[in-house]
């Protein structure tokens, strides 16, 4: 007489189907000493809503013909989440996120706001999940659903990928030292600015403006690359190094 699923939340409410023979007219289904609510009954199955409980309990079905042999049902506590890493990522999704806690071994889904992702369970204390795409930049609640229920309490912040426009000025001497204003979007979390692959000192003025002092470079057009927490934006050949005069 199989039981499916054979585990559920300690708070009860799990829909459980018990299959077997001669089950019609079921008058009681007990989880340990507690009665479950019968919602459907046929000669070969009984569907119930589990009561609250804890640990492992025997499940029996009583019909006019008697009481069945017991099957085991395992009560699972609600998950506890202690940390999430990283706590932010690109709005497009795709970052691997690690969640630590307890009671995670039966995790079936992780919700990032309204979006849902399927996790990979590493152990009862850890799971990993690929962050789904976010609806917009900003924080969303993160919840984990297991056989024991759903637990909230963590937050993940979506960050838009940066864009950059035409720098001002767009050229300067190969000796470097030109202060360049770089317009764009989503620049608040800028982590680095490079000219031709060479890091440059920079300052974030606001979400749409970064200034940088050009490092020494090679004559010709060079890429400007701005890297933020939300990704990387490249201005191909956006700054031209000018060779000094020779006589």
Image (cartoon, rainbow, N blue to C red):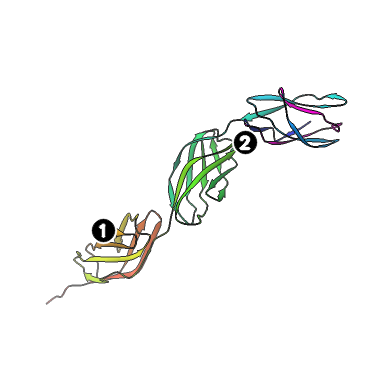
Going by the picture, which residue comes out furthest to the top?
33
Callout 2: few (<14), some (14-19), or many (20+) C-alpha neighbours within 10 Å?
Answer: many
Q: Residue at x 42, y 59 (%)?
A: 161
The image shows residue 11, relative to residue 194, as above or below, that is above
Find residue 37 and report its image quarter.
top right
Q: Give the mark nearer the N terminus: 1 vs 2.
A: 2
Label number found at residue 120:
none
> What is the count of numbered marks?
2
Bounds of the magenta span?
11-33
- Residue for badge 2: 147
Instruction: Answer whether labels 1 and 2 touch (C-beta < 8 Å).
Output: no
Q: Secondary structure at mark 1?
A: strand
**Where is residue 149 shown, x and y percent of the image?**
60, 37
Q: Determine whether, in the image, residue 183 is placed left or right of residue 245.
A: right
Q: CA distance from mark 1 to mark 2?
A: 50 Å
Residue 18 falls inside the magenta stretch: yes
């Amino acid at each position: 007489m199989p039981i499916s699923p054979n585990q559920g939340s300690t708070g009860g409410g799990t829909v459980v189907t018990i299959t077997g023979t001669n089950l019609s007219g079921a008058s009681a289904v007990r989880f340990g000493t507690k009665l479950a609510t019968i919602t459907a009954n046929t000669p070969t199955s009984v569907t119930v809503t589990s009561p609250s409980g804890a640990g492992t309990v025997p499940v029996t079905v009583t019909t006019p013909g008697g009481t069945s042999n017991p099957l085991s049902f395992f009560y699972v506590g609600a998950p506890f989440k202690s940390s999430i890493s990283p706590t932010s990522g690109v709005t497009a999704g795709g970052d691997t996120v690690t969640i630590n806690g307890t009671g995670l071994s039966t995790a079936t889904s992780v919700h990032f706001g309204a979006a849902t992702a399927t996790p990979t369970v590493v152990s009862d204390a850890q799971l990993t999940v690929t962050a789904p795409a976010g609806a917009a930049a900003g924080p969303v609640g993160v919840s984990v659903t297991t056989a024991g229920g759903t637990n909230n309490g963590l937050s993940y912040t979506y960050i838009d990928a940066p864009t950059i426009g035409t720098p001002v000025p767009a050229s300067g001497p190969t000796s470097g030292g030109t202060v360049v204003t770089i317009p764009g979007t989503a620049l608040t979390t800028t982590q680095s600015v490079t000219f031709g692959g060479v890091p440059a000192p920079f300052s974030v003025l606001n979400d749409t403006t970064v200034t940088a002092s050009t490092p020494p470079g090679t004559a010709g057009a060079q890429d400007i690359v701005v890297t933020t927490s939300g990704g990387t934006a490249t201005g191909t050949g956006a700054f031209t190094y000018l060779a000094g005069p020779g006589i």
